[in-house]
Amino acid sequence: MLAKRIQPMAFQARRLYVELMFQVMGRALQAVSEIDATVQKEARALPEGFLFEMMVMPDGPRLIVEHIGNGRFHYHSGSAPRPVDLSIQFKHIAHAFLVLSFQEKTAVAFANDRMLVDGDISYAIRMTRILNRLESFILPRLVAKRAVKEYPANLHLPEKLLSAARIYLKVASNFVDTVRT
Amino acid sequence: MTNQYYEFFCPVKVIAGKAALEHIPYELTGLGAKRPMIVTDKGVRAAGLLDPVIAACEESGLDIISIYDDVPPDSSTGVVKEIAGIYRREKCDSLIAVGGGSAIDTAKAVNILVSEGGDNIAEYSGAGIIKHPLKPFLVVPTTAGTGSEVTSVAVITDTAKSVKLPFTSSFLLPNAAVIDPRMTLTLPPHITAATAMDAMTHATEAFTCMAKNPLSDAYATAAIKKISTSLLKVMDNPKDSDNRLELAQASTMAGIAFSNSMVGLVHALGHATGAICHLPHGMCMSLYLPYVLEYNLETIRAPLGELLLYLEGPEVYATTPASRRAEASISALRKLRDELFKRCKLPRTLKETGSVEEHQLDTIAEMAMDDGSMMFNPKEVTLEDARAVLKRAWA
């Protein structure tokens, strides 16, 4: 009986967590593209104005970023200004939760058919590399190891801490800006 | 409880063995089709491979209404449109693809146009665009390697935009794959070897990459056993129809395995090499397979070691210490490649192909990094890693 009452709350909490994580990741993608040369190099191969979306099917939470040129991303907090070029779609909120709570690596989620790619697969591979790089920066090493296929051997603590601090600072100021506007 | 999860799907009826072609009329009639069109290429027709197909149908009173035999090695949107036009003009109601990967992919694309309507196949490019079952469709493979008869993907070149268009839908799968040993009996030795190694790579990567699952494992190991047992016998005696059938079945089984568990770095490098240096796909697979397995070794030690049983048989497996089985599997594949090199000069290194320049390796590595197969490789691959594998494969 108690479980039945708690279940809707758990579902609601899971949805809120996924929504929040998408908001953090979207802003963090923008931030990492402003400070990391490797991410900028990867992103430069994307066309200018390229819109990337990660969402939960059929019409669940989503994050949308745009490549605004020179390897920089811009996070769109609302809806996409035009049809997106690449969409990575989780089949269910439960699958998004598994990935965003670092219980399942992104690559494993792909392998397990938890999500679909709508758009150019080579861009999806590139965006996954960027997401992996971001997660390696912003997550503690032990957590990051659960999120990415392989934690980068050449990412040392000073670089990680400095980059993470700069990314979190930018994410926080972006949140504040959003609230103000 | 682990997070293990998998999906497995293969609704294709497999019709395999002696006189399999003679089942085509029954299968088509069962699907309500009376006016089939054959899609094939000039090589298949010149080799006389259409004759038994046509004879099998006519003997049962089923007339082949139209034959399109001009599918190029890299099929294009223009060719698809042309064939769809003939199909409509002749009021055909079903398709039979007879050939290798290109003919099969072309027929899959034609089936989209004639079922969904329109003239521009590019409009249907992507995943999940097709929502309805298509026209009755049978596939008769004439090579034993691609596994296209059991994959839900087709790739067609858009010549105007110089891009390859992928089409993915379970509705692309044929109603039946007809595997008859007569269709591969005249395959030249180097194509037999390259296509069999293509199937070997499909099975090996299916068994060792990230999306492996118990069902695809069963198909992959069975395919590897068949290829290991039959390939050299066929190379020594090309008219050995029993072993030809074993290879053809192995190809289909490997196709079922990899279409459900995907492939990895061998394919990523192979796709890039094929695009840049225009080398046949099977040759690239054979060439890269041991080098990639060595690269992935520590991540795939357990499954690769298990493959020794299917590559070398129970005696060798039992006498090899468990800690050496993975290396022994790679050695077995190298030994097989050496035997194929002796028999038909199937290249083992990029240098031996004579078609790759050393300065192209960087471009190949960069292109491979964006290949979809990279996602499923068990070990994370950096650009430097890809370059290192290519260097080892150079000579």
Image (tube, coloured by chain):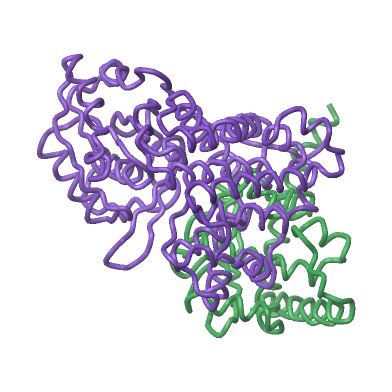
Residue B95, picture quadrant: top left
Question: In this view of the protein, can residue A53 be seen by the observer?
Answer: no
Residue B142 x %, y %: 36, 36
Residue B112 x %, y %: 30, 42
Residue A13 x %, y %: 77, 49
- Left or right of B171, for residue B318: right
Q: Nearer the viewer, residue B385 or B34?
A: B385
The quadrant the N terminus of chain A occupies is top right
Relative height, residue B376 to residue A27 (above, below): above
- Left or right of B321, for residue A34: left
How many numbered marks appear?
0
For image coordinates 42% across by 52% down, the residue present is: B126
Relative height, residue B148 to residue A68 (above, below): above
- Left or right of B282, for residue B99: left
The quadrant the C terminus of chain A occupies is bottom right
Chain the render paints green: A
Q: Nearer the viewer, residue A154 or A90?
A: A154
Residue B178 x %, y %: 37, 26
Question: In this view of the protein, can residue A177 be seen by the observer?
Answer: yes
Residue B32, picture quadrant: top left
For image coordinates 53% across by 81% down, the residue present is: A68
For image coordinates 54% across by 31% down, the residue present is: B230
Relative height, residue A40 to residue A147 (above, below): below
Q: Nearer the viewer, residue B139 or A70?
A: B139
| Colour representing chain B | purple
Q: Nearer the viewer, residue B107 or A115?
A: B107
